[in-house]
Amino acid sequence: MMGRVSINREQTTETNTTAVSNVFIDKYMSEANDAQLKIYLYLLRMMRAGRPTSLSDLADRFNLTEKDITRALRFWEKRGIISMEYDSDRKLSGIHLEDLKEPAGVPEEPAPAAEQEEPAAAAPAAAPTAAVDPSQLLFIAEQYLGRPLSVTDTQTLFYIRDELAFSDALLDYLLAYCAERGKTDFRYIQKVALGWRDKGYETPEQAKSGSYRYDKRIYEIMDLLGLKNVPTDTEAEFVLRWIRDYRLPIDIIREACRRTVLATQKRRLEYCDRILASWHESGVTKKSDIADLDAAHEASRKTAQKAPAAGQTAARPNAKVHNFPQREHDFAQLEKQLIKNGDPD
């Protein structure tokens, strides 16, 4: 049986290292995603070197959008790990990394009853977490919507937060939800907010679970795959990943659905997801990119067919050759694997 593994640090000069607090590793690291971890560790690195950075620098370095960087920074700010400063134009001007302290130890046992003092009056309940600073809220909204806010926009934004009692997290999700759909008009944003208020949504999770049931894009794509049921959470997440995370145009998704329906009758969402993941990794953004991939694949297939197998000599000129049509190897193999994974045996 394998025992514990010791982890040792090679001795090196201090200027070549970046120290990470144990508090961060023990308390905060597990709840962060890949992008959030990269951003925080890089900020530590830049602080150690005494060098500045910027949203565009972070976005270029980690192949993310500036909105992704802003969301990662806000994630850490909400947890009290960093604080951000803004200039008079509401642009980010400074990031401060807070000193992480070890959590308080186990409280001492109370003194024996005879030695205890009279109980003190109950302390007042802790005040709720302060809302995001107004200038910061405006900055966040402008990042999501990609434009400066007018006076009317600003009034509507604070109406949603204060009058409709949206939490910072729910307001953040509302802005992201509308921006993803290309709806940056505050009349639309307010309409969605009122609908969520009427449905009793108080958290992003509630809004996310309810919103996809009315998302026409999800129903269209499910229909293209021959799936007529009301989408489950898991099914909706497939479609939202293609739209929200891969940011693929709808005509690209339609093409993947068409190929999926022609290729398999089973587990079509998983099959389509594999196609779109491959296209996303290949940088597909338009249908001509797909045509280029198809052409490259066909050329590779023909080359493989012409090449003699290992240990064999090429066919004699007068030899009879039987040519059988070959299926597309990648899609056929994928279908077999999906069917195999779905069998109980």
Image (spheres, grey):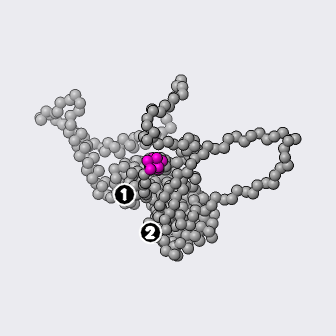
- Residue at which label 2 appears: 147
Q: Which mark is residue 155?
A: none
Q: Residue drawn at (49%, 65%), measured in percent from left and top?
A: 87
In this view, the residue farthest toward the bottom is 152
Nearest to the observer: residue 172 or residue 86:
86
In this view, the residue farthest toward the top is 1
Q: Which mark is residue 252?
A: 1
Query: Residue 157, relative to residue 17: is it above or below?
Result: below
Q: Nearer the viewer, mark 2 or mark 1?
A: 2
Query: Residue 343, relative to residue 250: is it above or below?
Result: above
Residue 204 in the image, given as x and y percentages of width and height? 57, 58
Q: Which residues are magenta?
A: 43-50
Q: Residue drawn at (54%, 60%), measured in percent from left and top?
A: 173
Where residue 25 sits, quadrant-wise, is top right
Is 267 placed left or right of 296 in the picture? right
Numbered disc 2: secondary structure: loop
Nearest to the observer: residue 158 or residue 135:
135
Where residue 129 sits, quadrant-wise, is bottom right
Is 14 placed left or right of 111 in the picture? left
